[in-house]
Amino acid sequence: MIKAKLTFLSTICFFVLNSCDSKSKTLSVNERVSALLKQMTLEEKIGQMNQYSSFWDVTGPAPKEGSAAIQFDHLKKGYVGSMLNVHGVENVLKLQQIAVEETRLGIPLIFGFDVIHGFKTISPIPLAEAASWDLEAIETSAKNAAKEAAAAGINWTFAPMVDISRDARWGRVMEGAGEDPYLGSKIAHARVKGFQGDDLSNPSTIAACAKHFAGYGFIESGKEYNAVDVGTQTLHNVIMPPFKATVDAGVRTFMNSFSQLNGVPATGSKYLQRDLLKRDWNFDGFVVSDWGSIEEMVEHGYAENAKEAAQLAVEAGSDMDMQSLAYVEHLAGLVKSGVVDEKHIDDAAGRILRVKFELGLFDDPYKYCDYTRETATIGNTSLQDASLDIAKKSIVLLKNKNQLLPLKKEGLNIALIGDLADDKTSPLGNWILAAEKNSAVSVLEGLKSYPGNNVEYSVGTTLNIGPLQFAKELNINTTDKSGFAAALNLAKTSDVVVMVLGEHGFQSGEGRSRTNLGLPGLQQELLEAVYNVNKNIVLVLNNGRPLVLNWANEHIPAIVEAWQLGSQSGNAIAQVVYGDYNPSGKLPMTFPRSVGQVPIYYNYKSTGRPNLPSPGEVFWTHYQDEENTPLYPFGYGLSYTTFEYQNLKIESQTDTTLDVSVEVTNSGNFEGKEVVQLYVKDHFARPAQAVRNLKGFKLINLQPGATKTVQFKLTEKELGFYNSNGDFIFQPGEFSVFIGGDSTADLSLKFKL
């Protein structure tokens, strides 16, 4: 462990009024925070609330002019509390040395980074991981991401994103757990525990950040950064549960949202940040703004200028300013003029210092700067193995007519077609800031790792043209069909065609909303052309959101939803296609038949006219030109085997609890996993509830012919809900429970409590 010479004998000298009394080591974190705050000037406290992105190459000379020079001066004065987008032990160490050895109080920095689905070793995008419904694997994925990021000097991630969304047009659905608050809450809890572990001072853990607080997933028309307008029922019963789950899991930071919620930018919402989060939920960590979102309240038309935005944000409870400079430029003057009460500064700075103490940064500012650990951890084989494990579990089998899959491992001539089949960057997904480009295992490599078949590749059509840039729009090919002929000739002479189509990794994520949810570019035309010469097609989808797949569902015999699976993508897909792993994933979001159905979700509320009165009548809830039902419902996913559900019964019942059981049998020929899902309908409630809500699930493994009795317990927690005042209530009455393999499960029974 590197030990640099400190300006003072020990950083603990600051804990009790500049005293190096050994008693300081035994003080509580809150006492140490309080003692340190008493020594800080107003400007130093505001400095803890100021976060900068990396602004110069720290291995080179210090900046001499421009904004970089100003930020460097702030760093040396102790007016910076956190840095983001800095990683690698060498870079982190140099900045931490400035903060610890050259500022008056030597307060260490906290280093944040977007460790969304991996650091160097990339796991599946979070939406794909949610499709595994495997909470242990999801927690392990986050744990491994934290371990690798921490080895590179990072001690804070801007994850998990726990926004519930019902709108596939929104590009950031790839970053969340889908449409359901129950599943989303379980996954949110698992990811926080994975990142933070049981001891935040452990150098292999990092602080997690629940985002985006709140309602971001409900932006109007699925358009990034748009307004959100929802009722209190949706707010408390759909949006808030995953956030509350992160608090229950001990999450140490929150990030507010770019969007407005009912006319108030989330960054300036006192209700969200002070009243609900910090008061009602007793959250004692800190809230960071999203990038520049404090100053963006001016663009929202909510604040007149950056100075007023700083006032509104700090009074609302936004503790740290990410990169807008509003706090560092305006807060001191606002306090000195009496406009802002200094208690807000003390509260915010104290919360930030508390997390730094919990991370152990005051006891050892360089604990995340170990070159040996960095070398030994980054890209470790065990991390790759874990990435492969969760990738296989995330794959969803959507269709398998006539059991085309799994493919034989010998004797087949396979045509592999599609630009994405030989792509080693797109499978990594969107948030890959630290990953090596072109480092994923491609589908071509994965299939060729099975030498018994002859696999020949043809691109068919190029998906995108020109360079890939994280912050730039992709140029999608819509005209060049020059590769069609070669692909069709190959397909004609092959036993089976594997087509890898979908979205590029940079077509989903932040700033990447879409109104057309079909296959981008010329891919649909290519798919239909290949089908005309060889109907024996396995369609492998790479995408970051639900797509509209009506034509494929009608014509293509086998469809595999493979998302963007990360570093081991090609190996995971090959193992599923060849049957070495039986797919067990279930959809965490509904797949629509048409973009006109969006937002579409399983737990909708009934209308007063839900059913067709008589043939031909129009006065009921429906479309003239499309069915009401989705193409693939929430919770849906096939297996190479089949499962039968029977003997659903009540085991025991009290006034407020119910124990139910169901028998699940593997009725097919393969060993397989099944996600047994339990849904509840509250028949009569005030306010009215959804037609059904997920309230339990269990992942089981069964050998062919085996039967397992699966049990669930329902309590007031599962049967209650939040009323319009945000109070959790339970109303006795008549309920139905449904159990099956997806949200359309029809095995049910009624009961009264």
Image (cartoon, rainbow, N blue to C red):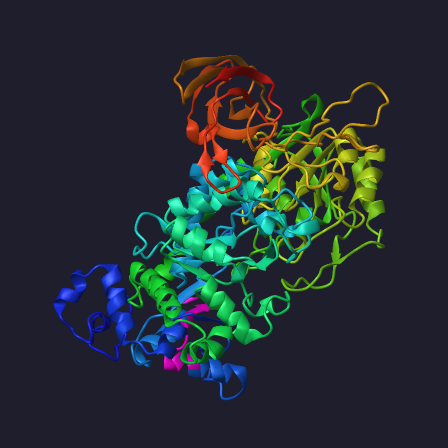
Residue located 39% across and 67% down the image: 344
Q: Is residue 86 magenta?
A: yes
On the question of residue 119 being in view, the answer is: no
Badge count:
0
Q: Is residue 402 left or right of residue 239?
A: right
Q: Position of residue 367 (x, y in %)?
A: 31, 64
| Residues drawn in magenta | 74-91
Question: Looking at this rendering, what residue extends furthest in the top direction?
Answer: 647
Is residue 692 visible in the rendered structure shown here?
Answer: yes
> Which quadrant is the N terminus positioned in?
bottom left
| Image quadrant assignment for residue 551 | top right
| Viewer-closest of 255 and 175 | 255
Q: x and y percent of residue 133 in the render? A: 51, 35
Toward the viewer: 275 or 122? 275
Q: Which residue lies most toward the left here?
A: 22
Q: Dividing the picture into quarters, in which one does residue 345 lie?
A: bottom left
Between 410 and 364, the one nearer to me in the picture: 364
Q: Quadrant of the C terminus?
A: top left
